[in-house]
Each structure stands twice: as C-alpha cells, then as structure tokens.
Image: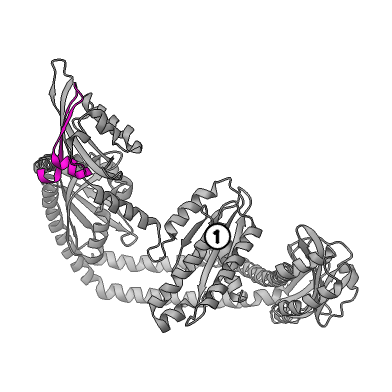
Amino acid sequence: MERIFRNLKYVMIGAFIFVIIFFYFMVYTPLKDELETSLTNEFKKELSIIELDVENHFKQQIEDMKSLSSRTMIRKKLYQYQQEQITLEELQEYTQPKYVDGIKALDDLIGAYRISNQQIVAKCGQTEIINLERYYQSENKKSKLEIFPQQKMAIISSPIYEQNELLGYDIASFDLSEVFKRLDSSDINYSIVHSAPATNIFQQSKDKIESFRRILNTHYFLKAEMPKNDLYNTLYNFSMLLIVVIIIIIVIIGMTFKFVIDKTSKQVINELEDKNQKIQQALEYHQKYEKLFNNINSGVAVYEAVNDGADFKFVDINKQGQEIDNVDKKELIGKSIKEAFPAVEEFGLFAVLQRVYQTGEAEKFPITEYEDNRMTGYRENYIYKLSTDEVVAVYDDVTEEKRKEEELEETKNRLEMAIEGANLGLWDWNKNTGEIEINDNWLEMLGYEDKEAVQTYQQWKSKIHPEDKKRVLKKLNQHTHGQDSYYESEYRLKTKSGNWKWIKAIGKVMEKDENDNPLRIVGIHQDIDDRKKAEEQIKYLSFHDELTGVYNRRYFENEQERLNSSRRLPISIIIGDMDGLKYINDNYGHQKGDKYIKKVAEIFELVTREEDVVARVGGDEFAVLLPETDADAAEKFCQRFDEKIIKFNKEHQLVTSLEVSLGYATKTKDTQDLKKVFDQADQAMYKNKENGR
C-alpha cells in the first residue's frame, strides 16, 4: 500500500504538467473565444433592454393618447356635434375642462389639441405645433408617431371614433429630454435617425459594432454604436490574470496534495481495512434482511422520496406484496407510486407517506378500499421511516374479510330495519288480486285514518309523484322478474292534505307459484321526508351565499362555464365592489358591515331579470351574468343600480353612505371567453373605483 502511495505522487506530478498544457489549449483558448462571444451577447442584451425601454416609452405615450381619445362622455359629445345636435361653442364649453383634466394624466406632455371638422375643440399646454393641419387633414385611421431628435420632441396623433365613425383627432407633443438623458448616460453611443441600412440589423466592422432597430412601425431607428477596443480591453486583462491565478492554484493544490498523502497514507490504509470489515458485516445483515423480507406473510414496499416528498418511487417490494397487488417487481422498481397506482391519492395512503416522511413518526393507516382500472381491494397499512430516509409500508390484503363483514353488516341493517315496527309502515301485496294490506303506521305516515284510502295496487300507484312513478315501477318490475334480489326505492307519495312526502320502500317476493311467478310481495315504508328536506337544504346552501341568499361563486362559475358555449349573445357581466366595507367593519362592527352587504344584494336583485344571475363572489364583491344583454343595456343596468343606491342613501340615516363601484364588459362573439370578459369587467370596475365613478 505504501508503494502505491509513493507511485501515486509521481503520477500526480505528471498529471499536473499535463493539466497545465491541457488547460492552455483545451480550456483557456476556447474560454477566451467563449468570453468574447459572451461579451458580444451581453452587449446585444444591453442593447435590447435600452431599445425595449425606448419602445415601451413611445408605446405608453401612444396608449395614453388612445385612452384619452376613448373617453366615453367626451366622445359622445363629439358625436352629437358631428350630428349637428350641439354647436361648436357648446362642444368647446363642455370639452375644455374635461380635456384639461384628462390630459393631466399624460407624462412629459408639452401641449395638446382636440380637432373635429378641422376646428379646435379643446387645447392644453404649449400648443404651438408647426404644420398642425397635416396631422388631421391626412385622414389617418390609426395613431401616428413622429419624432424630432434635434428638438428632443415627439408628436402623436390619435383618431377619435364613435360607432365606427371618425369624429376627429387628439394631437399632442411630448418632451423626450428624459429619453435622451437615459440614452446619453449609457456607455454605448445612442442616437435616433430617420433611415438605416436595413430593418433591425446588428453588424460588426474592424473598429466598431453597430445596431439599428426600428422604433415601432415608424420610419425612425434607434442607432447604437461602440468601439471594439472599449468592449474587449477588460477581457484581455482578465485572461492574463486568470492564467496566473490558475497556475498558482494548481501549484498550491499539488503541494497540498503531496503533504496530505504523506501524512495520511497510513491512516487511509487502516480506515480501508475497518470499512472492509464493516462491509462484510453489512452483507451478512443484508442476507438476513432479504430472507425475512421475502418470507414475511405481509406485503412490504420500500419507497424513496422524490422532490422532498412531492412524489415517491419504488425501491423494493417483497414477494407477498407482488402477489397482493398483482405486479412484477422488475417493472415496478424506479416507478412513481402515482404511476403504478393511479388512485393512491384518493385512497389516502399518499398523504400518510408524506406525513411519515416529514415527521418521522410511524402511522397506522386503517382498513380502506383501493380501486383503479386495474384492481380493487381492501388494504390495512402500517407506515414507518428508515434511518436512510426511505419510507416502508407493511400491508395486508383484507378484502375477503371485509366483504364478509360488509355482507353481515348489510344483513344486520335490513333485519334491524324490519323489526323496528313502531317507525315502519308495512305492506303486503297480492299480485294476483291486486289487493294491498297495510298497517296503521303506513296510514299515519301519510295522514290517513281509513284503510280504504289504499286497498289496491292501482290506488297506491295513483299516489306516486308523477316525476317518480316511472322509476319506481321499473325498480319493482326488475325485482318481480328476478333481475334484483330485492326491491328498494325512494320516492314521494301524496298525503291526505295533498302534500308530498318522501318515503323509502323495501320489499321482497315472499311467495311464488309453480312456474316461479311472484304471488305475494311484502315490504316496509320508512319516512325519510326530513332527511330529503335536509338534503335539499344542503343542496341550496351549496349554491347560495349564506349571508345574502343570492348565488355563491361556485354557482356563478358553473353558469359562466355553461353560458360560455351558449348562443344567447350578447352576454354582459357586471362586477360590483363595495367601497369602505373595511372602514365600517373596523369602526362599527361586522354586524353593521353584514347589513350593508345584504342591502347591496337586495338592490342587485331589484334591478335584475328572472333569467339574470346575481352572485356574491367575494367578501364585498358581487357579479351579475346578463344573457342577451349588449353593452348599452349593461350601462343602463349600472345607471339603474346607481339610482337605487342614491335613493337608499337619501331615505335612510346611515353611519356612512352605501357606495358601490361598478364595471362591465360584454361578450359579442362566440370566440370570446367569458372568463376573460369577467376579468375585463373587473378591471373596468377598479378603473371606475380609482376615478371615483
């Protein structure tokens, strides 16, 4: 062993020399080329960031102008002027203050005009724009951007439409000083030019690198230029420093390695001998484990956690486990438990595996039925974690015992039901004569006193609810023809008072003739009316908001999904959000806040039609689905709602007024998604809330 370590030192010296040569030709040279490429790519990346920043600046200014041109009320006044419903002076008087108010939201604005019929309707700021006429006489149908680099200024014209009719233009000039200031602060030389060799090019010459990028869809280009020496000088200095540092590191590592080998060679030899002895012991233990593992009567599966317990894959499974689950170990090892047993999460075992893996505490998973397309059966599991972080499941197949237990339980339940005479109605039907004998409980269950009320099969059939009759008679017919071992059905019977009561009927053929035809069927009735009403109440609560009584979010989303493929277009969605609910709850208590919420729900229901869907979709948020309702009708709906709110506030002395912000959006085409229409309505609501509308 000592001779091996001595030879190893010589090998390492040769290896270090080889590494140095290898590093220069195979690492340094490719690295240098790679770094040059990387620097060029970084240069391109920085260009892209600046270029996108400039484009986004102009895009934002164009979007701001479009938003200004689309303001509904001012646009409608322009339309009235175009239709000669109002004069120019009336239009100017109405538009000027609102135009000034809207223009304040635009950043870096120098001045702006609103033009209609070649007349100035409104203006704001420094409004001296040279050749103003060419921006509204050219019949532009889209927003147009012109840049004046020397003046550091841009002019944007935005057409104004109402009902697809061109009403005029908004024309504004913007200060580009901040844009040029950001460009000048960069190490790259930027400029905006009116022409370029080609669209969006990147080229290198001997001395410099140039880039041209078209600004939006204009005839202007952002030009970037940088000398190559400025880009690569740092690379050359870094390369030389890197070579020196790596050589020093290699020398230090070699000296350290030699020192460590000399000092620890004997210690390594001793440790190797100790480890060899432990390996032999581990092999003996593993052989004993394998024998126990494969001969135990229970199934044993070993799992390894994947992604900190997000999944588990099979490490091992014993013979009994393969027989229980009808699997082959060779195909199972390395496979995800979810892939091998698709229903493991519904089964509940997956959650137990995660808990045991996270906590390290063993758990017993009680008898539960597992079922997927491949197999079904009852399993009882015990889960624990090994010191290696692997998780082990020891389980038994108790399907046969569970089936017998269920059969016994079912028989017991039927017998117990049959002997609880005090709560059951008994009936005995003679199939040949059609006569039926019933007990007093049967009569009292339906409010009758005279047994003559039901003496024949036809009388009983006439009291079955029309919606249930076909189903009940089919069940009874299946039993009398031997298809079912017994007759069982839940249905409604008419009481003496004319109401309907839910009962559960169970019966069985008790007597047959020589041809195996049923002669006598005996059974019981159980009053389940309260249970059915409770089920209906639960069903109602599952789709309604408990506080307000309107539909809840779950029902709203179901209806939204159903109407998404409906042809009842247009479909509008109204979103309403209460203002100041947190203030009311914090200062006057949640009971007061609940009263405000219920009042909003009442007002929504007052202004909606029967086919509309009103739902509370959040703490203070409501949504309304309006089938066959266009945008104008949705706008009128919002106006009616606002009028109701104003009226309520006037008629009641409130600690604080009831305020609700509304927004709407409309689906007009089959290709539109109602979920996106919902988001648009929500955004419109928040925009109105911010604007105090």
Q: Could you say which is closer to the camera, residue 1 or residue 684?
A: 684
Is residue 219 in view from this perspective? Answer: no
Residue 389, picture quadrant: bottom left
Tell me if 306 is positioned left or right of 559 in this view: left
Measuring from the top left, give residue 500's x and y in whole percent.
30, 44
Residue 106, picture quadrant: bottom right
Q: Which residue is mark 1?
A: 678
Tell me if 374 is positioned left or right of 36 in this view: left
Q: Which residues are magenta?
A: 421-449
In which quadrant will I find the C terminus?
Answer: bottom right
Q: Residue furthest left?
A: 419
Task: Give me the residue at 19% from left, 67% from top.
Answer: 271
- Identify the coloring: one colour
- Residue 453 against residue 236 in the figure, above or below: above
Task: Give me the residue at 46% from left, 76% from top.
Answer: 581
Measuring from the top left, give residue 322's x and y in whole percent.
20, 42
Disc 1 residue type (three-letter) = Phe
Measuring from the top left, give residue 504's x and y in whole percent.
22, 41
Task: Give me the residue at 23% from left, 23% from top.
Answer: 481
* Residue 435 is inside the magenta segment: yes
- Residue 693 against residue 532 in the figure, above or below: below
* Residue 232 is inside the magenta segment: no
In which quadrant will I find the N terminus?
Answer: bottom left
Q: Could you say which is closer to the camera, residue 116 or residue 206?
A: 116
- Residue 515 against residue 412 in the figure, above or below: above
Tell me if 569 is positioned left or right of 181 in this view: left
